[in-house]
Image: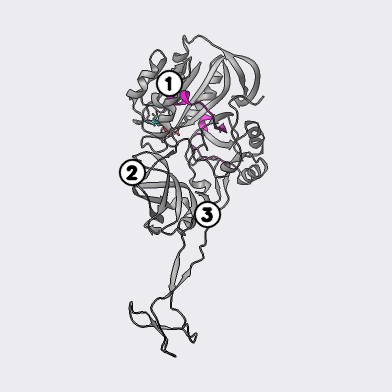
């Protein structure tokens, strides 16, 4: 039986993922497979932070089991498969836990719980990760299921989409949680131990931004999460966890997730781009990038259907040094997302396919005596002072471009959860959807 939950948190605290170990340890049922942390459309304005929803399967565990976490002093086991259990009072039990933790007095928080014995149509996941979905669109898919939506019921959208995700490409995240009394306090994660973990456990990613000295595994906001370690091999995450030194924690659990998959991106022509889209656009640089107030860098690209502005915002730090070197005529593929007004792509990564030949004008030397010529007036060519020779055209000298074709991405400090790191384009990291026993 699948359980999907979303929208229990607010900017004042909580994190929906915390409910997974809390529910598993309270209900007397087994966890089947890994729980899922599913990121949805990163551009929708009503998200709290990273637009995450959760789904997990419970039942009577069968087959092999393995430890995928610890919580309140007990191991969390995951079973290879399971037998179905009756749904009778599960929704009520989950509602009680949601009501205990959800920030229901925040007007934006509208939790949703969905319980389903079957997978929900995968199309809901794709729509929710790539566009804006209405509750009216989702409701027919919930017919006959047990579900409960609080307030505006918006959380039902994410809860259904999380169950609907059918992982083909996936990564993992081990999340460690603080005890409740520490949720709103400063937390401690030792920087050097994170660097050691990053350099030792090679299947982890986005742990530390070396250039910007930013510990990416520790959340910026005050939430139950103490740290989250991302990786492509779930078995390595346990080893990584043991290297990280931090405040003591209540427990941890490993999720499978769609983070680092680029599932949000859709190839589009410029004229097809809509508000809240995330796109891959092939185009040609139209204007030289220029810096605007705030340190943001803006330039335009065009294709056969139109033109659009692209931005490398200040928070993308050294990525702007690359963007600054683009010139009109360069062929690029821009990967990025659009907010409400479809006039700017917020770049996540860029592939420079080819560089335009750029020439600069130079006053020519005299073809007869070799002396440097001088201008004969604007648009009137060049004259040699020594021997009187005339030349109508200047020399055109090809400029050496200080950039190479290839992929470039924003640094870890500005990385989106769903963005596939360019390192993944080179290595095979697709995991089978079964547990690694
Ligand atoms: P956190 O990352 O801290 O868990 P959050 O950023 O996930 O928080 P939520 O509080 O869950 O934010 O708010 C997102 C809300 O948007 C949820 O109610 C969810 O159901 C809804 N939602 C998610 N994706 C879409 C979508 N594509 N279209 C419409 N609504 C969506």
For label 3, the SS is loop
Q: In this view, does 421 lie above or below 430?
A: below
Q: Earlier in the sequence, mark 2 or mark 3?
A: 2
Residue 405 got which mark?
3
For label 1, the SS is strand
Mark nearer the viewer, 3 or 1: 3
Task: Read off the magenta span.
Answer: 160-189
Q: What residue would you read off at disc 2? A: 271
Is residue 36 within the magenta segment? no
Q: What residue would you read off at disc 1? A: 113
Q: In front: 8, or 140?
A: 140
Is residue 164 within the magenta segment? yes
Residue 225 image position (x, y, % from top left): 52, 34
Q: In front: 425, or 19?
A: 425
Q: In which quarter of the image is ligand 1?
A: top left
Cα gap from disc 1 to disc 2, whole angstroms: 38 Å
């Amino acid at each position: 039986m699948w359980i999907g939950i979303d929208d229990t948190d607010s900017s004042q605290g909580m994190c929906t993922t915390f409910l997974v170990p809390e529910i598993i340890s309270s209900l007397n049922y087994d966890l089947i497979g890994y729980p899922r942390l599913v990121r949805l459309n990163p551009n929708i304005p009503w998200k709290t932070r990273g637009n995450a929803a959760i789904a997990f399967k419970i039942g009577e565990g069968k087959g092999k089991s393995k430890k995928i976490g610890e919580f309140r002093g007990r191991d969390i086991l995951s079973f290879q498969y399971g037998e179905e259990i009756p749904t009778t009072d599960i929704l009520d039990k989950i509602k009680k836990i949601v009501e205990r933790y959800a920030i229901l007095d925040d007007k934006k928080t509208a939790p949703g719980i969905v319980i389903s014995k079957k997978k929900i149509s995968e199309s809901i996941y794709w729509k929710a990760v790539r566009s804006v979905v209405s509750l009216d669109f989702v409701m027919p898919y919930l017919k006959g299921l047990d579900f409960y939506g609080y307030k505006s019921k918006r959380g039902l959208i994410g809860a259904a989409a999380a169950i609907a995700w059918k992982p083909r490409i996936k990564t993992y995240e081990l999340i460690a949680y603080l005890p409740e009394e520490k949720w709103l306090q400063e937390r401690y994660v030792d920087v050097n131990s994170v660097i050691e973990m990053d350099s030792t456990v090679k299947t982890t990613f986005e742990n530390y931004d070396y250039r910007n000295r930013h510990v990416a595994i520790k959340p910026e906001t005050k939430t139950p999460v103490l740290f989250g370690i991302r990786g492509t091999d779930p078995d390595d995450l346990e080893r990584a966890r043991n290297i990280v030194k931090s405040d003591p924690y209540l427990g941890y659990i490993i999720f499978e997730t769609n983070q680092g998959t680029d599932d949000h991106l859709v190839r589009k022509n410029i004229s097809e781009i809509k508000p809240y889209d995330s796109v891959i656009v092939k185009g040609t640089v139209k204007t030289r990038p220029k810096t605007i107030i705030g340190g943001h860098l803006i330039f335009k690209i065009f294709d056969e259907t139109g033109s659009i502005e692209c931005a490398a915002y200040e928070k993308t730090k050294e990525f702007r040094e690359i963007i600054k070197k683009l010139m009109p005529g360069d062929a690029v593929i821009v990967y990025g997302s659009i907010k409400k007004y479809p006039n700017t792509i917020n770049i996540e990564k860029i592939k420079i396919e080819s560089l335009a030949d750029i020439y600069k004008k130079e006053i020519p030397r005299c073809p007869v005596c070799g002396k440097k010529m001088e201008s004969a007036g604007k648009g009137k060519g060049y004259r040699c002072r020594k021997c009187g020779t005339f030349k109508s055209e200047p020399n055109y000298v090809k400029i050496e471009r200080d950039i190479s074709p290839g992929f470039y991405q924003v640094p870890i400090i500005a990385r989106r959860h769903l963005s596939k790191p360019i390192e993944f384009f080179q290595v095979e990291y697709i995991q089978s959807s079964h547990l690694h026993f």
